[in-house]
Image: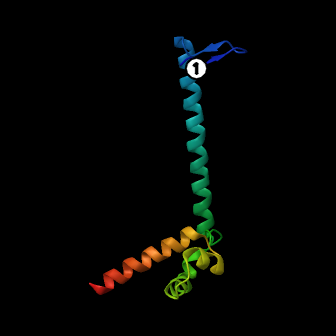
């Protein structure tokens, strides 16, 4: 596959074009790594100051209610709607609850 940029006369079918593409990719990768490094440093500083706590886990707090509603016979979709969480979260909570009940039986 050949990539040609007409307005700057760049063509990846030539050695010079391949070099330019490689150099641009290297600069882009460097910039990305620098950005991630600055972000990680900012998060570390914010955590040290107690300002960065992340998102509050909403579905896990409601797991007891979810397990109870499932035991009462409601469908997973109905439980999700009633509790106000996603259906995938209900499936995840049900799976963990089932694994814990199997382990407690052994």
Residue 17 x %, y %: 57, 15
Q: Which of the two residues, 72 or 35, is positioned nearer the viewer here?
A: 72
| Residue where numbered disc 1 is placed | 20
Q: Nearer the viewer, residue 90 or 44?
A: 90
Give me the residue at 56% from left, 37% from top.
Answer: 30
**Element at badge 1?**
helix
Where is residue 37? Give x, y as percent: 56, 49
Look at the picture and state if 82 lies above or below 32. Answer: below
Report the residue at 59% width, 68% height from top. Answer: 47
Q: Locate residue 76, reporting x and y percent.
A: 55, 75
Q: How many labels does the image show?
A: 1
- Image quadrant in which you'd find residue 97: bottom left
Nearest the camera: 75 or 60? 75
Q: In this view, does 91 lie to the left or right of 80?
A: left
Q: Where is residue 42 in the image (x, y as percent from the top left)?
A: 62, 58
Residue 102 occupies which quadrant of the picture?
Answer: bottom left
Which sits in the foreground, 87 or 26? 87
Residue at 60% of width from left, 61% of height from top?
43
Q: Sort mark 1 into few (<14), some (14-19) or many (20+) by Cα contacts within 10 Å.
A: some
Can you name the residue that lies furthest to the right here?
7
| Position of the C terminus by quadrant | bottom left
Indicate the colouring scheme. Answer: rainbow
């Amino acid at each position: 596959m050949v990539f040609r940029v007409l307005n700057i006369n760049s063509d990846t079918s030539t050695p010079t074009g391949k070099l330019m593409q490689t150099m641009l990719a290297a600069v882009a990768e460097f910039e990305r790594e620098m950005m991630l490094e600055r972000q990680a440093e900012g998060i570390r500083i914010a955590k040290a100051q107690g300002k960065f706590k992340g998102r509050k886990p909403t579905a896990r707090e409601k797991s007891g209610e979810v397990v109870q509603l499932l035991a009462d016979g409601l469908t997973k979709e109905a439980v999700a709607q009633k509790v106000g969480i996603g259906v995938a979260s209900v499936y995840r909570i049900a799976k963990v609850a089932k694994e814990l009940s199997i382990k407690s039986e052994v």
